[in-house]
Amino acid sequence: MEAEQKLAETLVPIGKMKGEVDGKFEAFYLARDKEGQLFINHNPPFSKDRLNKSKAWKMISQEKLDSYKKQLHFIPSHKTGIKR
């Protein structure tokens, strides 16, 4: 049961977005949970637990992500991201 809960809390990295929005620099990491919900984190820790769902990961809508895609540069996750 604990292993199932651990899997439910782990996010799948998608990549990073960075650039300028309304004259302000933005940079954040994107990830999805197993239900397909999108999350952003502006400052994830550099540890093995960085992809665990926590308060630092904020849920965003697909519409908000689409808005960011029009303004920001996307850098895909190379090692463990979603394959296209």
Image (tube, grey):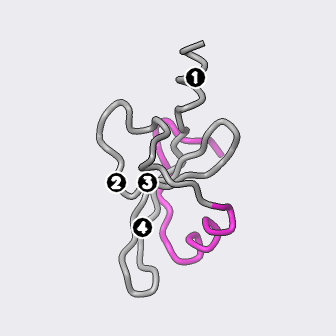
User: What segment carries the magenta color?
Assistant: 61-84
Label 2: state its secondary structure.
loop
Spatial distance from mark 4 to mark 3, Cα to Cα?
Answer: 12 Å
Give the number of the disc on residue 41. 3
Relative to 17, 63 lies left or right:
right
Mark 4 nearby-residue class (10 Å; few <14, some 14–19, many ≥20) = some
What amino acid does circle 2 point to? Asn
User: Residue 42, relative to residue 44: is it above or below?
Assistant: below
Q: Which residue is mark 4?
A: 18
> Is-magenta flag for residue 80?
yes
Relative to 7, 24 lies left or right:
left
What amino acid does circle 1 point to? Gln
Q: Which residue is mark 1?
A: 5
Give the mark toward the camera: 4 or 3: 3
Looking at the image, which is closer to me, 49 or 84?
49
Q: Which residue is mark 2?
A: 43
What amino acid does circle 3 point to? Asn
Q: Residue furthest top?
A: 1
Spatial distance from mark 2 to mark 3, Cα to Cα?
Answer: 6 Å
Q: Answer with the quarter of the image where residue 24 lies.
A: bottom left
